[in-house]
Amino acid sequence: MKIDTLTHSIGEWLRGTGPESDIVMSSRVRLARNVANYPFVSRASEQDRLEVEKMLRDRIATVPVGRALEYIDVGHLQEVDRQLLVERQLISREHAEAQGARGVAIDVMEQVSLMINEEDHLRIQCMHSGLDLLGAWEQIKVVDDQIEKIVPYAFHPRFGYLTACPTNVGTGIRVSVMLHLPGLVITRQIDKVFRSLHKISLAVRGLYGEGSQAMGDFYQISNQTTLGRTEEELVQQVGDVVPVIIDYERRAREFLVRETQQNVHDQVSRAYGILRTAQTISAEETMQLLSRVRMGVLLGLIGDVKIADINALLVRTQPAHLQKLRGVELDTNDRNIERARYLRQYFEEGDAGNRSSVN
Amino acid sequence: MKCQQCDKQAVFHITELEAGAVRELHLCEDHARTYLNQSEGGGGGAPDEEGKPKAGGLAGALDVGQTADELAILDQRACDHCGITFFEFRNQGRLGCPHDYVQFEKELEPLIANIHGMIEHTGRRPSRGASAGSAGAEGAAAAAALPEGTDELTGVICLRREMKEAISREDYEKASEHRDSIKAIEERWIPPLHKEG
Ligand SMILES: [Zn+2]
Ligand SMILES: [Zn+2]
């Protein structure tokens, strides 16, 4: 791959389909695994890392995941290509910025990705569009079972699957949903919702910002503990809370339309206007405005934009995607100009935001 | 508009939705901060990309139940297999190898209890066969749950380190002995790869 193929395709979580996809962007499950006969990655020698990468790469290649897996040697990628994989949520920022032998195997639909030599030897991730945690869990379970047959995982009778960081030990599972919560942000209820999530040991983070500061009202909720409960219980712990948040968000959106319709309509229309006419625009502002437009479309205040297209724009206006689409390296200034141009062109032509694509 | 709790200008207008009812709050910056932070328990710093606590919070959690002297002694201890000291682990928040969980089991237990609220894994287990192995002190039940070959496989980490040491002191005979042992263990416990197609 095919980084270039990837640039023009549409990833699973961008499809904007699946249950509750007006609020739930994607559902993700990941498992942390290590092989028993090597030190953990942070203590592994260069030689160890090479051997682990080769062993896992060769073995993963024989695992039937239902679709073809493409292997990408992350250690030998250009920075912009590594960044693109991060923007696509196929590898973590840590994995992109790490040193030494490492890679990722990705299925052609971008549902399954297997990171080799991240913080743990193996991080298996499965991502589905909309609210589908059970679907993601069922899929990843099969992949994990297949790999387990041919890879000796590090396991302890009491502590379970062993991980480099004790915060992941036990099941090694991290279950998360990415939510779009503009209603709760505008009505300033978001902090309160998060406080109650912390109380039941769920973690919340803003998706694109630093720390817990969100950009564009996108938030990720995940389980904080990994040991002492079964994988199914942890999937359910996150799954149980999502309908409650969805309900809050829907009520907040209804409240906004009912009590402040003019105001909201004005905000949404202005956001839409800026996106269609700006001559230079930062990634942050774009994210914020796209978030508002996305809400406007869902509230029926803007008619002629598709949710899947906004999802695509959210990713394609990020730095690496912009540069790959343009085919040249751009500094921040030029990126802001190119981003504005890309957005204007999209909204003028009003097609799938996908004009250079085969898919 | 004035703050509902003092005479300052209200700059935060918070809308609470509770059981379908809407409640408006108008607060100055100070009172808004207090309001938003109330009952904000624990949690050392912002979570990382995946939402798990950062290593800093981890090091803090490690102080439970150890005096400074005890900790100083503990810090010196090193894993037989990978050589990481407890001090290095405390600093980096990352363990060195799977054997650390065996070697530092007692010390990690309160930490794990602190993070997860539990110390016994109840989830999935590897399907590869169980063995009585040489698990020793933990008793038959625990040993039975240990996947086959685990001890020998983690032992490879130690053998590889000894092999490297042998090479560096030019003891090639010893080094090749170690190499043979590693190969034998890996062949015994890691299934051969059948390439398909
Ligand atoms: Zn006040
Ligand atoms: Zn060790």
Image (tube, coloured by chain):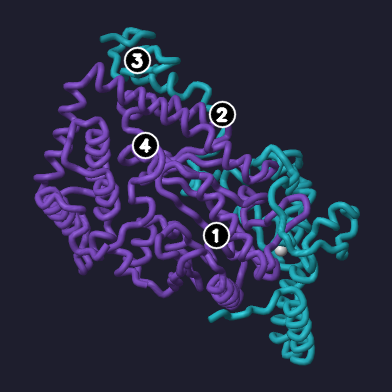
Specify the subunit that label 3 lies on.
Answer: B
Q: Which chain is cyan?
A: B
Residue A55 visible in this rendered orientation of the protein: yes
Side (left or right) of B121 relative to A49: right
CA–CA distance in space, label 4 to label 1: 27 Å
Of callouts 4 and 1, the N-terminal one: 4
Q: Give residue B147's position: percent from left, percent from top.
A: 77, 62
Q: Which residue corresponds to mark 3?
A: B27
Pointer 4 and pointer 1 on the same chain? yes
Q: Nearer the viewer, mark 4 or mark 1?
A: 4
Q: Are marks 3 and 2 in contact (CB under 8 Å)?
A: no
CA–CA distance in space, label 1 to label 3: 45 Å
Q: Secondary structure at mark 4?
A: loop
Image point 41% across, 23% down: which residue?
B33
Q: Which residue corresponds to mark 1?
A: A123
Ligand 2's image quarter is: bottom right
Of callouts 1 and 2, the N-terminal one: 1
**Label 4 amino acid?**
Ile
Total number of numbered labels? 4
Q: Which residue corresponds to mark 2?
A: A199
Image point 25% across, 46% down: which residue?
A310
